[in-house]
Each structure stands twice: as C-alpha cells, then as structure tokens.
Amino acid sequence: MISSLEGPVYARLQHLHLRKRKEAARRLCCNGCMLTRFRQTAAELGAVNTAWYVLARALGLIGCSLQRYLFLAQRVAPQAMRRTAGSIVVRGLMSLDELPPAYPRPVHVVAARFRQGGCSIAAWKGQELAGILWYQLGAYQEDEVRARYCLPSPASCWDYDVFVQPQLRLGTAFCRLWDEAHLRMRARGIRWSCSRISAFNPASLRAHRRIGTVLLGSASFITAGRWQLMLASRPPYVHLSCSAASCPKLVFDTAALEQKEFPTCPATC
C-alpha cells in the first residue's frame, strides 16, 4: 500500500501523479485552443476555402504544396485617402541598384519583376524603408506558381506584393503607397487594379472586403516535384504542366465591369 511506503517515496509518487495530471490538462487546453482557432478560421474562410486549406495541410505532409488564390478587382480611387503627406516620403524605384537592403525579397525575384516591366513604389520614413508596392501593365507572370495573368483592357493593371514593415503597419505608409499608386494609375487612364490574394489569409480577406473589391474568380495550384496541376473557375479551368515552358494563362477583362455598378467603400487613414 502506498500509505506504508517511506515518506520520500510516497511524496515522489504524488509528485509524478500531479505532473501527469497537469500535462494532461495542458494538452487538453492546447487542443481546445487549436479547435477554437480552427473554428474561427473556418468561419472567416468559408466552407469551400476551409476544405482546400485542410487539403493543403494534408498535402504538405507528403511533400506536396497547394496554393489557392482569389482574383479581385478594385476601382482606382478618384482622390487620395490622405490630404497631407505627413512624415512618409514616396518615390519610384527604377532598378535593382535602388532596392534597399531592408526589402525581404530575393534579388532574382525582383530582377524578374523589373525585366517584365514591373513598376515599384517605395515609401520611406526618414532613412528607413516603410513599404513597397508593385504594379504591372498588360500581363503579369506569377512568381509563386507557373501562371500568367493577362489584362486585355488598357484601363486595367495588376498590383501585387504590397509590403509594409511590421512596426509601421499601424501608420500611414499603406495609405501613402496606395495614394501614389492610384495617382500614377489615373495618369495612365487606368480605372481598375486587379490582384490575387491567398484564400487562406483571413486578414487579407477582411481588408479587401472593406475596400469594396469585386471577385473575378479563383484558382488552386497543386505542385508535386516538377508537376503542377491548376484547377480554376476561369478558362482554361484545368491545366497540367511539368516545366516552365507550359504555363496556364488566365484572362481578366475588366471592360465588363464598366457596365455594372459596384458599391465603393471609402477609406481613410
């Protein structure tokens, strides 16, 4: 019987028993928190995107990857969100030589963007890089998967990789970048800016809903080694490739949007 054991031995057994109970309680709490987070994420993503997210996690366990994108269009703002510039200075970057060291993107990726005609706008707070925004006219070659996005309307462009330093995301850098981008777009007669966002990013989904974007379609890319399978809601709908020479082209014609009225969500910073 435990009661007849030596005092130190009995105390040791009690300690081990208590530690096991605490460990079990901790695991139960962690599982409960994970379940709560999953339910919150599922509520924000919706049933379809949640199913894709679960599949992406499962594929990751066997060395494959799945990217799911939503394609959106937003009307170019007729006026600036901020009336004053504040402490943020915005200017264009024309070459790799002007790229600041604080920009967390591989040099070869940035070089490819410049080669295909990408336009870059940088925001600065003093000598510190605050953020960078990219946009592209005509067509954009995706740099995460093998895909090319084509924009036949001259009144549209493609924006991508809007980056703001984490410590400055509550400031005015984001608004200043978009104000400058929309100013340049209006000067070129552009009325719609298209983009793709991850369907698995609730924060990005919320942000785009607030600014009144229009959903153009979706596409999922499953990659296993050199093979890539695309399943999309737009032509060509299904595409299988094994090299960069074979690349699906998705066309987004914003001319049809001009015939419709969409609610706009005024933004201020």
Image (cartoon, helix red, strand yellow):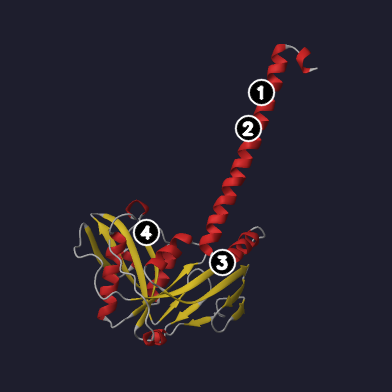
Looking at the picture, which amino acid does disc 1 mark? His
Q: In this view, does 101 lie to the left or right of 34?
A: left
Q: In this view, does 80 lie above or below 152?
A: above
Q: Nearer the viewer, mark 1 or mark 4?
A: 1
Q: Nearer the viewer, mark 3 or mark 4?
A: 3
Alpha carbon separation for disc pair 2 and 1: 11 Å
For the C terminus, the quadrant is bottom left
**On the picture, is 17 further left or further right than 155?**
right
Residue extending farthest to the right is 1
**Residue depicted at 36% across the width and 86% down the height:** 258
Q: Counting residues from the N terminus, which is met first, the one under dot 3 or under dot 4?
A: 3
Query: Which mark is on residue 49?
Result: 3
Q: Decide: few, some or many residues near mark 4? Use Cα within 10 Å; few <14, some 14-19, many ≥20.
A: some
Residue that carries the numbered disc 1 in the rendered image: 15
At label 3, the amino acid type is: Asn
Q: Do labels 1 and 4 touch, CB within 8 Å?
A: no
> Disc 3 versus disc 2: distance between alpha carbons?
36 Å
Quick one: SS at disc 1?
helix
Q: Which residue is drawn at 43% across and 85% down?
A: 253
Give how far across and how far down residue 23 sits, in percent: 64, 34
Report x, y in % for residue 201: 49, 61
Closer to the N terminus: mark 1 or mark 3?
1
Q: Residue under label 4, please give it.
A: 103
**Comes first in the chain, label 1 or label 4:** 1
